[in-house]
């Protein structure tokens, strides 16, 4: 069963809004929406566990914030059907930052939020300190992962694969268009953990008339394989390496930073570094490999997913979620 891609609406009309203005219209914030009408009818009619809709917004419609030394607070509202939890990430220019959903709570890179009202509005506050120095302006994206708190050890293999590929669980969506101006220094950029090693190959006329014939090169796209295949579930012996080969192309030029998470923790998959930064445009294939060394993972199942973003809006995800099962 195949699901159509979630409708991602990029609203226009931002104009030259002052980044310190807190009266920006709600339409300036990009909302990601997965609607039940985009699901395959046979799936939605036969499987009541399918997640049929996901939506997110900033409650007060504010797109522009100022960091003055106190945490930035985003009033986040989400709706989701048939999901008991939501996983959340906050990215600053593509780099995940720690955040909390209560002012006094410990901050984490990945937070699992219980869905209180299924199919209804759920409101939370997101507290975080942005990355950057005084005078910087950073682009902030919220990543929401449907049912990010599922117990992947509690169900059999086929059911788990169905949950990922059919029921839309552990699928990442995003809300973009949020900007933060820094009046004071924020978090360090962690530049030592950014890899900028990647390959470029010129896109030829043969590519455009062949493999890319039906592609829209005006938008950034991603292709991938995992050990040469595209599985949602991989079984490997402990100590084996899982190589995820990623290819970006398209758009009018954008710097993208990609991150892999294993069990909700950032994994140093890029030559031992946590993040992969690369430049992507419509003239070249940009390729790199993320490697997960299972000698560092415990025996059992591990949920993996990846995200990317940059200083400009992009709706591309490096790979969908997949499971690695490590055996003795």
Image (cartoon, rainbow, N blue to C red):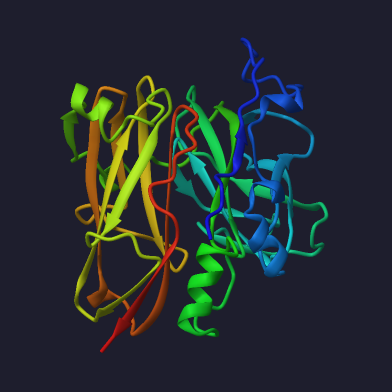
User: Toward the viewer: 137 or 263?
Assistant: 263
Query: Which residue of the protein is positioned furthest toward the front in this rendering?
Result: 42
Q: Residue at x 64, y 48 (%)?
A: 127
Locate residue 240 relative to residue 34 in the image: left or right.
left
Residue pushed farthest top? 16
The residue at the point 27 percent across, 26 percent down is: 208
Question: In the image, what residue occupies the spot 33% across and 59% down?
Answer: 230
The part of the image, by quadrant, that contains residue 328 is bottom left
Name the one closer to the observer, 193 or 113.
113
Viewer-proximal residue, 317 or 144? 317
Res 189 seen here: yes
Residue 210 in the image: above or below residue 272: above
Q: Position of residue 306 (x, y in %)?
A: 41, 53
Residue furthest to the bottom: 328
Q: Is residue 204 visible?
A: no
Q: Picture coordinates of residue 321 (x, y %)?
A: 45, 60
Left or right, 284 with respect to 304, comes to left
Residue 203, quarter of picture: top left
Numbered circles on residues, count:
0
Above or below residue 296? Residue 59 is above
Residue 154 in which image quadrant: bottom right
Residue in the image at 62% along x and 19% along y: 19
Q: Position of residue 151 (x, y in %)?
A: 56, 78
Q: Is residue 225 above or below residue 13?
A: below
Percent coordinates x, y for residue 95 in the rendering:
43, 43
């Amino acid at each position: 069963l195949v699901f159509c891609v979630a409708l991602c609406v990029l609203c226009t009309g931002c104009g030259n809004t002052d980044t310190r203005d807190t009266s920006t219209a709600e339409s300036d914030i990009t909302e990601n929406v997965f609607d039940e009408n985009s699901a395959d009818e046979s799936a939605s009619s036969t499987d009541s566990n399918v997640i049929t809709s996901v939506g997110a917004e900033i409650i007060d419609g504010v797109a522009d914030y100022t960091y003055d030394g106190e945490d930035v607070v985003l009033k986040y509202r989400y709706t989701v059907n048939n999901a008991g939890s939501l996983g959340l990430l906050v990215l600053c220019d593509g780099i995940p930052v720690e955040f909390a959903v209560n002012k006094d709570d410990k901050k984490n890179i990945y937070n699992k939020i219980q869905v209180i009202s299924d199919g209804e509005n759920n409101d939370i506050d997101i507290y975080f300190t942005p990355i950057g120095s005084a005078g910087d302006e950073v682009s902030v994206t919220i990543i929401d992962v449907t049912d990010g708190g599922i117990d992947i050890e509690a169900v059999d293999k086929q059911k788990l694969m169905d949950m990922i590929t059919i029921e839309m669980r552990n699928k990442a969506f995003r809300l973009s268009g949020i900007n933060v101006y820094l009046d004071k220094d924020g978090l360090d950029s962690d530049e030592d953990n950014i890899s900028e090693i990647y390959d470029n190959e010129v896109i030829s006329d043969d590519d455009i008339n062949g493999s890319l014939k039906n592609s829209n090169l005006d938008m950034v796209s991603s292709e991938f394989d995992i050990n040469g295949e595209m599985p949602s579930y991989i079984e490997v012996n402990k100590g084996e390496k899982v190589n995820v080969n990623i290819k970006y192309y398209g758009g009018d030029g954008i710097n993208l930073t990609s991150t892999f998470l294993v069990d909700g923790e950032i994994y140093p998959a890029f030559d031992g570094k946590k993040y992969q930064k690369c430049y992507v445009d419509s003239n070249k294939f940009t390729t790199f490999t993320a490697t997960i060394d299972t000698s560092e993972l415990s025996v059992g199942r591990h949920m993996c997913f990846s995200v990317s973003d940059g200083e400009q809006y992009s709706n591309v995800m490096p790979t969908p979620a997949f499971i690695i099962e490590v055996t003795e």
